[in-house]
Image (spheres, rainbow, N blue to C red):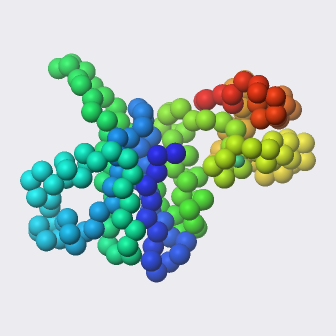
Amino acid sequence: MNLVWQKSYYEPDRYAGLAYLSPDDPYGASVIKNNQYIFPNGGDFLTGELYQIASIPGYNPYSYNQDLTTVMSAKRTYLGTDDTVEVIFALAVSKSGLGDLKNSVLKAKLLSGAAIESGDVDGDGELNLGDVIYLANYYLKGGSPPVPLVIVGDVNCDDEINLSDVIYLANYLLKSGPDPCIH
Ligand SMILES: [Ca+2]
Ligand SMILES: [Ca+2]
């Protein structure tokens, strides 16, 4: 997930995040100090300053607790005169912790129509046997549904969630079976 987030200093469970959803990976993201980049200039960047920040590839966090701004930049795209490009970002806030923030971003991703990977049904960011057990519990024992939306449990993309998904996921993890599908 291409997500940059900031955590409230005063409210530990309060988060705000910026995610780049499509068309591909972002070029870079930086967290910058407001009192250095914004306020001294009357609420605006100096000429070339924003370009300089946005030209740094990768994630460049600034982790000191103070007033901060997040800048995220896309890869360079070359367009003809009649071309259009659709770029989708998501802004999310949460008062219930980082997991809730990530789930909100994934929901936004689904709603935007962007591709979403299946398989991490417990939403912990990893694909492992815990997901097989979680999915089996959901289907067989009425356990908690896959998060953030049930669709991530349909790992073979046949529009149903049933025992074949549990087996498919187990095969992938234990027997090098095919990858969980992308919706
Ligand atoms: Ca997982
Ligand atoms: Ca299925």
Q: Position of residue 102 (x, y in %)?
A: 55, 54
Query: Residue at 35% across / 51% down in the picture?
Result: 29
- Picture layout, residue 84 above or below residue 52: above
Query: Residue at 11% across / 67% down in the picture?
Result: 41
In the displayed structure, does residue 156 sit left or right of residue 162? Answer: left
Task: Locate the C terminus by quadrant.
Answer: top right
In the displayed structure, does residue 63 sit left or right of residue 77? Answer: right
Determine the image quadrant of residue 172.
Answer: top right
Determine the image quadrant of residue 63.
Answer: bottom left
- In the foreground, 153 or 1: 1
Q: Position of residue 49 (x, y in %)?
A: 15, 55
- In the foreground, 37 or 98: 37
- Picture layout, residue 103 above or below residue 183: below
Q: Position of residue 58 (x, y in %)?
A: 38, 47
- In the foreground, 7 or 172: 172
Tally of numbered discs: 0
- Residue 7 seen in the current view: yes
Query: Residue at 33% across / 55% down in the picture?
Result: 30
Query: Residue at 17% across / 71% down in the picture?
Result: 39
- In the foreground, 74 or 42: 74
In the displayed structure, does residue 152 sit left or right of residue 25? Answer: right
